[in-house]
Structures are given as C-alpha cells and as structure tokens.
Amino acid sequence: MYGVKIFLLVMVSLSVLGARESLSQQALKQRLEPIPSDEKTLFSYINDPSDPISEDKVELGKKLYFDPRISKSGLISCNTCHNLGMGGVDGVETSIGHKWTMNPNHLNAPTVYNSVFNKVQLWDGRVSHLEIQAQSPIQSEAEMAASTELVMERITSIPEYVAEFKKAYGKDVNITFEKIASAIGVFERTLVTPSPYDDFLNGNEDALSKTQKEGFELFLEKGCTKCHYGIALGGTVQPFQVAAKYKFIEIGNFKGNENGMVKTPTLRNVAETYPYFHNGQVWSLKQSIMDMGSIQLGIKISSKDADLMMDFMHALTGRKPVIIYPMLPRSTIKTPKPDMN
Ligand code: HEC
Ligand code: HEC
C-alpha cells in the first residue's frame, strides 16, 4: 500500500515536470541554437573548406580590415564603419563614406560580429558569402570608392604585403583583388562572440538572471523567433511591416529585396549596435522591441514586458575575440598616393 502511494507520487511529480518544458528546450524547439562551446564544432561551423581558415590568412585579413589604403582617399577602412571596439558598427544613423557621402538609401551599417552566421548579408540579402561581400564596399562610391586596379597597385607596391600573401596562399599564387577581399572575409569568419545566452543554452542554468529568463520566455511566447532564429537570431530575409507601417519608412526609401523582404538583423550584441532598423531611426532598444510588436506581430508590448525583453537582450552581448591592433606595413615611393577626388 505504502509502496503504491510513493509510486503514484513519483508518477504525478514526473508528469508535472514533464508538462513544462525547460526554457532551453522551448528555445531549441523554436529553432534557436547556441554558438557551440566546443572549439572543434565551432570551427566546422565557421570554416569554408573551399578557402579554409588559417592563422596566416586571418592575420593578413586583419591587417587589410584595418588598412585605410584600400580606400581611394587612404582614410577609410572597414573598421571606420564596422568598428570592432564599438560592437562592429559605426554608431551613426547612416554610414558616411568617401567624400562624406551618405549611403544612398540611408542604410545603417550592420555589425560584422557573428556575420558568419547570417544566411544572407546586406539589408536586402543580396549576397551570402563574406569573401564576395567584402569586394563591394571597397568599390562602392559611397563607401571606399577604390577601383580594383588602385587597390591592386597599392597592395602589390608594398613588399611586406606581397610576402604575407605568399605565406598565406602559397608561393605561386598571384595576388588578385578577389584574394584581397577573400583574406578580409576569412578574418571576419573569426569574429564570433559567445555570450551568457549561449552559456545558458549550453547547459549553465545560472548564466541568465531571473529577469533575463523572464524576458527570454516573453521573447519565445510572443513569436519573435518566427524571424529571429538560428545561431544568429536573424540573418534570413523576412517580410517587413507585416501588421503595421514602420513610421520612418520614407527615410532613404529602402524597399527591401524584389519581394519587399528585409534581412532580419542578428540580435547578438544588439545592446551595442544602436541606432536600430535599416535606416537607423530608432535609438532606444526598448522602443525598437515595442515597435517590432506592432510592426511585425500586431501586438502591443507593455513597457514592463519590453524592459524584461531588453534585459534578456543584454545577455546576448558576447565576449569579443582579443584583437591586437596590427602594425601596418609602410607604403613605398611606388604606392599610389591618397586621392581625395
Ligand atoms: C562607409 C561605411 C562602410 C565601409 C567603409 C564598409 N562598410 Fe560594410 N556595410 C556598410 C553598410 C551601410 C552596410 C549595409 C549596406 C546594404 O545593406 O546595402 C554594410 C554591410 C556590410 C556587411 C553585411 C553585414 C550584414 O549583416 O548584412 C558586411 C559583412 C560588411 N559590410 C563588411 C565590410 C567590410 C569587410 C568592409 C571593408 C572592406 C566594409 N564592410 C566597409 C557600411 C560600410
Ligand atoms: C516577421 C519577422 C519578424 C518578427 C516576428 C520579429 N522581427 Fe525583429 N526584425 C525583423 C526584421 C526584418 C528587422 C529589420 C527591419 C528593418 O530594419 O527594416 C527586425 C529588426 C529588429 C530589431 C532591430 C535590430 C537592429 O539591429 O536594427 C530588434 C531589436 C528586433 N527586431 C527585435 C524583435 C523582437 C523583440 C521581436 C518580438 C517581439 C521581433 N523582433 C519580431 C523581423 C522580425
């Protein structure tokens, strides 16, 4: 008799526990995925076997990322607009490039941190490969405005760079514009930032505070993961203005891709990547969360819920890789001079 009672008690408590999935289980079910804690698995996620990551390529790519001489003026580097000390962004509404030119669609610079986890890049998702993407800002008139010839002449006129290319890609490999962009892309692949959120999904229950867990639960319940999912919590194109108009849609007149879809930004490091939305019109993270409720889900998110969700988003601020600012090789007398025109 006594035995049966205990048996029933155990069964009842098991079913009560079973009825409620853990927060991590719910998250995984909604297609969220942590950055793997095991380095080998992580490497297999970020590596592209057709142009494998190596220490020499990363070191070269890092120099080129910080080198303003791949811009026409000699003043603008990738880091100007994707500042690795500022969450991988420039912190202004719209990017300013060559000759103080604004992005023609008033587009805000997305972060380069974790961009390796995006399925597609750019606000309309028109490129997917980081190594290919890196070619376009160098040439774009509103960004670095350099012709491929100019970039080639600058780099090949600097013997240290030539030596580093040979070291990274092999003695017989010719330096090409594509290789220059490719080295930058390989460096970008390493810009991965594991966060308390990943620690939590990887099994550390204490990695999130009580209010962060509440905010996480709201994030799952309200349907944010319909679009913000995967390792990036974003990185795919999705419908925009599903339920209501975005108040600032006219600014820059950006229309998304041919179907009006917009790339969902990663929410990793979102507390650092203000201002928000494609044209950088919203400076408050709390406001952007509330706006998402009305624009994308047709719901009103209360101020209290938005605070909790914002608290959760702070758990997405990741640990940045240690980046030692590179000493860049000196130009030679043959290096084409900065051109401000
Ligand atoms: C003048 C500022 C500026 C410079 C310089 C610049 N970018 Fe960007 N970058 C932007 C803007 C603005 C966008 C969004 C453009 C779009 O969607 O059409 C962007 C988008 C990106 C993206 C896509 C990220 C995503 O989540 O969609 C990557 C990756 C990137 N840039 C890397 C680079 C690299 C590498 C360099 C240097 C070779 C560079 N950028 C130089 C402003 C800049
Ligand atoms: C239907 C798809 C969809 C849903 C659902 C959705 N989002 Fe978004 N989210 C997007 C897209 C697309 C953007 C970019 C919009 C733009 O800037 O044009 C975005 C942008 C954001 C941004 C700004 C990020 C930045 O760097 O500019 C935040 C924050 C955000 N979403 C949070 C949320 C939250 C919180 C929820 C749930 C309440 C949510 N989203 C629901 C698709 C979605």
Image (cartoon, rainbow, N blue to C red):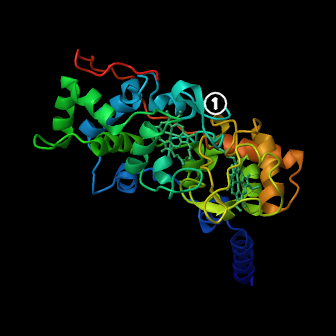
Question: Which amino acid does the dot numbered 1 rest on?
Answer: Gly
Neighbour tally class for label 1: few under 14, some 14-19, many 20 plus, Cα within 10 Å:
many
- Check the image and report above or below for 231 versus 169: below
Q: Residue at x 40, y 56 (%)?
A: 45
The answer to whether 254 is drawn above or below residue 237 in the figure is above
Instruction: Name the residue nearer the viewer: 220 or 214.
Output: 220
Residue 182 visible here: yes
Residue 23 at x, y = what percent? Answer: 67, 60
Residue annotated with mark 1? 91
Which of the two residues, 294 or 222, is positioned nearer the viewer here? Answer: 294
Q: Is residue 258 left or right of residue 166?
A: right
In the image, 297 versus 145, the foreground residue is: 145
Q: Is residue 33 left or right of residue 21?
A: left
Does the residue tagged 1 have its C-beta within 8 Å of any atom of ligand 1? Answer: no
On the question of residue 209 being in view, the answer is no
Q: In the picture provided, is 341 more to the left or to the right than 48?
A: right
Residue, x 41% and y 25% (percent of image)? Answer: 68
